Amino acid sequence: MHVSLRYGTGSFNLALSGRTAVRIAGGASAPPLPDERASLAAALERPVASLPIDRILPRTGTVAVLISDITRGAAAARLLGPLLEELERNGAGPERVVVVLALGLHRGSGGAGLESHVGARVLARWTVMEHDARDGGSLVDVGTTARGTPCILNRAAVDASFVIALGSVAFHYFAGYGGARKLILPGIAAERTILANHRLSLRADAGSGLAAGCRPGVLDGNPVHEDMLEGARLVGTRMLAVNVVAGGGGEALFINAGELDASHRAACAFLSSHMRVPVARRYPAVILSAGGFPKDMNLLQSHKAIRHASYALEEGGLMLAAAECREGVGSDSYADAFAEGRLAVPGRVRGRYTPNAQAAMSTYELAARFSIYLKSAMDDALAGKFGFGPWKDGYERYLLAGLADDEILVLENASLFLPETEAGADRGAAPL
């Protein structure tokens, strides 16, 4: 049998010679919306736990539209133009609106990258800015959460009369789900705000791994999510979330709008009903694609797909991961945690918490529990520092030798789809 798997901006053909009954999952989901523009308009007219846009949009003052960056995919960006048209139709034109790319600590795209993401027509008519978490002059302190996170946020949103958070909702490996409150914290937060919030993803002893509740598909009891939501509400401005769930090709499957938490939970419920992969038991071997660009643009992003796939893999099992990683590791702090090799990671994380310490600990734990082979554009020695072996053409033949067809699972898009045992028992990582 043959399977075509996304890889970078293209694909590769996985040949499973002599096999006829390997399970293939994580590709098909809900049908795409036939008319994204009409679905957006309907969502704004009938929002979740909120009045319609024409009744809550202030007649004066600035409107801040927060939008996900390119690593979250293009579905939300495609809705930006229609959303701005709806605002203008309701009296908030270019003179009142500022679009803020909620980058968190991700790098800005600028120039051609920015145009590619939001569109030339938007850039020509509307004010667009990229959030800078290290620019103190653009930030303002709005308070502190119950968990002690100092909430220092972008002034463009804090001083606005109305805020719209336009984001993609997908599984997130430690915040439960992306979107909504995440457009604010970490999206438009200061570096020290982001570090304080993300530190909650690790146990009290940071070198011991991810904290309880910090896993994909979990909101209640997830300390990072709960802190994000509390921090987002400290903005104090009237707010509306616009949530989109996208398919593997970036097409919108679901759009809603409404109160920050209620609308987000409705979008999460849709995602979970269509993008969980039920597994009766864990498999000895899992083969995955991270979903192609931008989900596999670097190792930091690709690691999330590997984490998802791990929930379908038995302890000590074999994982073959296809992720191009054309940009290499993707984070200096993530790379620095592995500078002395995988075994030194817990000590380095204990010594100093850095922006991607949780990704480092997650990767450390995955490489300790499973045999992971990576098909990528990265140098083999660099991938080896993270605990990954090379997956070269043809390696799958002997790595899978001796396994029956029903012992192998192929996940076509592990960034979007989350395996879960039918008993729902996989609620955390194995202890280190």
Image (cartoon, helix red, strand yellow):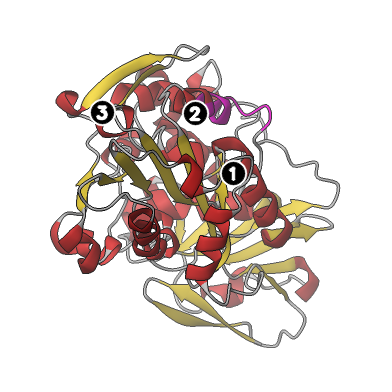
Q: CA distance from mark 2 to mark 3?
A: 18 Å
The residue indicated by pointer 1 is 264
Task: Find residue 271 and report its horizontal and vertical position in percent.
Answer: 65, 56
Task: Find residue 64 and report its horizontal and vertical position in percent.
Answer: 32, 41
Instruction: Give me the residue at 65% from left, 43% from top.
Output: 265
For the record, the magenta segment spans 220-229
Query: Number of labelled discs?
Result: 3
Compared across the picture, whether 365 is left or right of 262 comes to left
Is 223 inside the magenta-drawn segment?
yes
Q: CA distance from mark 3 to mark 1?
A: 24 Å
Q: Main secondary structure of the magenta part?
A: helix
Task: Note whether 56 is above or below 149 in the view shown.
Answer: below
The residue indicated by pointer 2 is 228
Mark 1 Cα shell of 10 Å, populated few (<14), some (14-19), many (≥20):
many
- Between disc 3 and disc 1, whose residue precedes? 3
Compared across the picture, whether 291 is left or right of 406 comes to left
SS category of the residue bearing label 1: helix
Q: Quadrant of the C terminus?
A: top right
| Residue depth check, mark 2 versus mark 3: number of the one nearer the observer | 3
The type of residue carrying mark 2 is Met
Q: CA distance from mark 2 to mark 1?
A: 13 Å
- Between disc 2 and disc 3, whose residue precedes? 3
Seen from the viewer's position, the closer of residues 15 and 389 is 15
- Between disc 2 and disc 1, whose residue precedes? 2
The residue indicated by pointer 3 is 155
For residue 33, what is the image quadrant? bottom right
SS category of the residue bearing label 3: helix
Compared across the picture, whether 305 is left or right of 84 comes to right
